[in-house]
Amino acid sequence: MEVPILKQGEVLIATFQAALSDADLEHLRRGLVQQVVRFRSRGVIVDVTAMDVMDSFASRTLREISHMIRLRGAETVIVGIQPEVAFAMVQLGLTLEGVATALDLEEGLAYLIEKFKNID
Amino acid sequence: MSKREITSRDSEARGGPAVEIVRSEAPSELLRELVAHLRQNRTLLREEWVVRISETRLLTAMTKEEIFAEATSVYDSYVEALETEAFEALQAYARNLSERIIPRGVETHEVVGIVLLLRDVLARSLFAKYQTDFKKLNRILDAYEPAANRIANTVAVGFVQERERVIRQQQEAIRELSTPVLQVRERLLILPIIGVIDPQRARQLTEQLLRGIRTNRAKVVVIDITGVAAMDVTVANHLVQTVEASRLLGATVIVTGLSPEIAQTLVTIGVDLGKMNTVGDLQGGIEQAERLLGYKVVTLAEPRQA
């Protein structure tokens, strides 16, 4: 199942609906990295609230998305990681280093807006 | 039962050994005789038992009257269990007794001790009664001892089970009490940790903290470990993991109250604390958290003189 990418002002929002296959993740990465420049977006939010498992591939892809988008001139924030998922990830050593995280969509937006303000 | 009697009669007819016959047909009768004897001498035997209990300095946590009262009901339940060979009532009584005496600090060896004493006192009275008839004594003991052993067993197991139940309950209570996640300001949680952290508790702590972050929508968490005396590699790593997991939920963690000893240990064992935000004491931690959240605390007036 592909992940829809929504545009909201200066921000792109991608919300995971269910567990994703590796191909879906690749597709998402390509889509986000292309669209962030096409829409001249300044921020990207990836909402993973619906994910109850995060494997190493998914976590690496999220990290790559974040780093690639920074190279394309925007900020990424991952939101909605569940407490159990967070702990499982940490135990597996998947700590999403260098990637911004926030509690939920609302927090993520607030984080980006704060970030934009600092830049402006 | 009747089937066994028939079998034993058969073996008699075949000229089997005489002892066999008596053994298989008599136990219930013998027990009845035994119980009658114990009922008859109730006062005397109970008295003797109580004397023996105080002589051996068991149950020192209880007064003489209490011991006597308990002894009476234990004696009666004991004889009843011998008579009916039904242990449920005795088991319930043992559990009830344990419930009452455990909070008073009665130890396992004392409970086992008094039951064995009673067994002893009763056996002695049997020796005295049947000393002239050795064969009969033997048969009586054959009937008495398995039942008495089972009773001792039942009481001891009942006591230990009750004790374990109490311990489990207390452990549960301590665990519940020991991991409070408190909100001090909006979006600011503190987690004071006191005492020894074992892996199970560490796990529980993390779970509660992560859940707390979610429900309180916390942005900053201050973990205060002033009350933690020692920390080993496992716990230190767990702490690092907790910090990282909290970050994945979008919360910053500040660790406060690392004692010099713990700091030394952590440096010596080479735990990477680079990712951890540490402040000397809880006050400093809360102040930094307030700065992160954009709070500013000002004094409005001079504090009144107390």
Image (cartoon, rainbow, N blue to C red):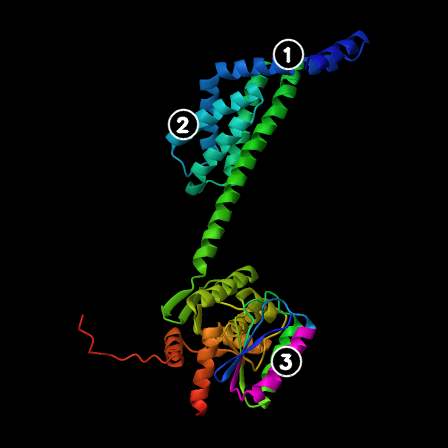
Q: Quadrant of residue B21?
A: top right
Identify which residue, B46 or B179, lies in the foreground: B179
* Relative image position of residue A89 (x, y in whole percent): 60, 70
At mark 3, the secondary structure is helix
Task: Find numbered disc 1 in the image and state the secondary structure of the residue it sits on.
Answer: loop
Provide the residue designation for mark 1.
B133
Give the distance between the C-alpha atoms of the residues marked 1 and 2, in whole angstroms.
35 Å
Q: Which residue is mark 3?
A: A29
The subunit carrying tag 1 is B
Residue plotted at (43% across, 64% down): B181
Q: Where are the magenta residues, as a range? A: A23-45
For this view, does A66 lie left or right of residue A106?
Answer: right
Q: B272 or A21, which lies in front?
A: A21
- Residue B183 to residue A28: above or below: above
Give how far across and how far down residue A86 sits, in percent: 56, 69
Q: Position of residue B140 (x, y in %)?
A: 63, 17
> Residue B18: percent from the left, percent from the top?
75, 11
- Amino acid at circle 2: Ala
